[in-house]
Image (spheres, rainbow, N blue to C red):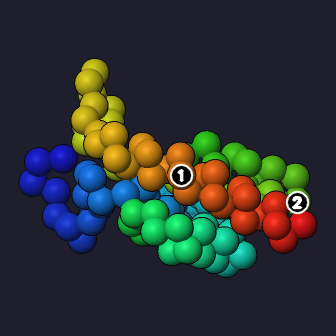
């Protein structure tokens, strides 16, 4: 967003998938340490570009899953995008690829631990 301060969002297009730790200032999903560790280890072990995101304002659909019943372990991967609520948005395909790679590697890593 033009004029946005890096303190509000330090995400950059082309620097990798965004791994969200907290959303809506803690009113939404707070990703558990177990899931965080799983995603970060998968990213580091496979050299997958990633960025850490803490969302101050809105929430993802992950918040609904996270608060369902007794709580469901939830991780949030996002594609850094400009003008997300406009008729047309801008993103970098490398970030999409890193999101797919990280989702696959995280699932594989989780399956190994079962």
Q: Quadrant of the C terminus?
A: bottom right
| Foreground disc of the pair 1, 2 | 1
Q: Quadrant of residue 87?
A: top left
Q: Residues within 10 Å of mark 2 (few under 14, many from 20)?
A: few
**Disc 2 element:** loop
Place of residue 6 in the rendered image (x, y in percent of width and height, measured from the top left): 20, 67
Above or below: residue 81 compared with residue 50: above
What residue does disc 2 label?
A: 70
Nearest to the observer: residue 18 or residue 65: 18
The residue under the point 37% across, 49% down is 95
The residue under the point 72% across, 75% down is 34
User: Which dot marks residue 101?
Assistant: 1
Q: Is residue 65 left or right of residue 17?
A: right
Q: Quadrant of residue 33?
A: bottom right
Q: Residues within 10 Å of mark 1 (few under 14, many from 20)?
A: some
Nearest to the observer: residue 15 or residue 54: 15
Q: Is residue 40 visible?
A: no
Nearest to the observer: residue 54 or residue 102: 102
* Furthest-front residue in this view: 46
């Amino acid at each position: 967003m033009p004029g946005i301060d890096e303190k509000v969002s330090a995400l950059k297009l082309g620097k990798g998938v965004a791994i969200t730790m907290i959303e809506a200032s803690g009113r939404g999903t707070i990703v558990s340490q177990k899931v965080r560790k799983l995603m970060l280890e998968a990213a580091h072990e496979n050299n997958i570009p990633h960025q850490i995101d803490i969302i101050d304002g809105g929430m993802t659909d992950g918040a609904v899953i996270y608060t369902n019943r007794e709580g469901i372990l939830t991780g949030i991967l996002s594609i850094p995008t400009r003008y997300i609520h406009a008729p047309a948005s801008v993103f970098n395909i490398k970030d999409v690829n890193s999101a797919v790679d990280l989702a696959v590697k995280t699932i594989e890593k989780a399956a190994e631990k079962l």
